[in-house]
Image (tube, grey):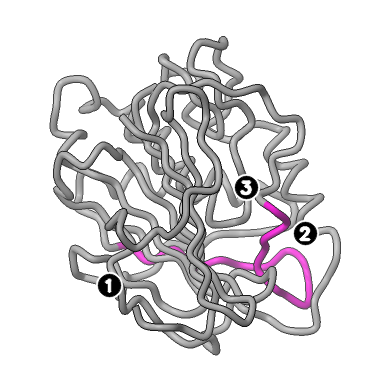
Amino acid sequence: MRRFTRRISTVALTVTSLVVAFQSTPSANHSWNGYHWARTSNPFTVRLGDNVSSTWDSHLLVASGDWSASSVLNTLVVAGQSRTRNCKPTAGRVEVCNSTYGNNGWLGIAQIWISGSHITQGAVKMNDTYFNTATYNTPAWRQLVVCQEVGHTFGLDHQDENFDNPPLGTCMDYTSDPAPNQHPNQHDYKELETIYAHLDSTNTTSALAPRGNAFDVNAPSEWGRLMHSTRGGRAQTFERDFGNGHRLVTFVIWA
């Protein structure tokens, strides 16, 4: 599938899933390093800021409904607070945006800012430069990508990263056929139950965390050191360390 500063006081974690072909082995556990929203009870609610065009509105609503089927979290689509191409984050919620971001190789980006292991804010971007082409200008591709990127902002990783494997029937899977992979599956819901099995003493879904996006997280020059690369370099992980436990991790799938 083709897809895929200023020192700040929160960890900036960018998951760039660009929905492209790459090689890896399926993962039975697809928590992303245990990153999660802090909350004092379940189910909790993650607000999704709607900064998308009318073309994307229905897909965002479907994704919100799909993820709200989880027993541990709900999502609520609310008015967006980032009406800019940069899609700046807002504390305690996820801003969802679309724009023509250019021929930069990525189809969708999910960004998570974390403090310790706790997510404090997030952003999702869909690149209309590719969605305006015949290959990706379909409801199935749009639904798969927005579902997957929103899923990343809850702390989920991919179930399978091998483009050539049969579809798993989940949007957290890379495949050449988006039709079966437009929604979460039961494995995703079970993984969310595992991630959110414990409760916290604080709640990062309230607007208490500092807002920050002083650097261009789309620019490879801001990603820091290459930490991991799959065979052929189709998927890579970068880390930028700000010190004192604060860092920017960028997961990139190249077209």
The quarter of the rendered structure image containing the C terminus is top left
Residue 46 drawn at (x, y percent): 56, 66
> Mark 3: which secondary structure?
loop
130 left or right, relative to 23: left
Residue sitting at 25 percent across and 56 percent down?
A: 52
Residue lying furthest right in this view? Answer: 198
Q: Amino acid at mark 2?
A: Tyr
Type of the residue with mark 1? Ser
Residue 79, quarter of the rendered image? bottom left
Residue under pointer 2: 196
- Figure disc tally: 3
Q: Is residue 17 above or below residue 222?
A: above
Mark 3, mark 2: which one is toward the viewer?
Answer: 3
Residue 248 position, x and y percent, is 49, 65
Q: Nearer the viewer, mark 3 or mark 1?
A: 3
Does residue 187 sit above or below 72 in this rendering? above
- Determine crowd level at label 2: few under 14, some 14-19, many 20+ residues with C-alpha closer than 10 A: many
Quarter of image, res 154: bottom right
Label 3, label 2: how far apart the Cα atoms are: 11 Å
Return the x and y of residue 183 as percentages of the image width and height: 52, 33
Q: Which residue is mark 3?
A: 156
Q: Quadrant of residue 6?
A: bottom left
- Residues at circles 3 and 1 in contact by the CB criterion of under 8 Å: no
Q: Which residue is mark 1?
A: 82
Report the magenta residues as a range. 33-50
Work out whether mark 1 precedes mark 2 in sequence or the reverse, and give the earlier one.
1
Task: Check contact, mark 1 vs mark 2: CB within 8 A.
Answer: no
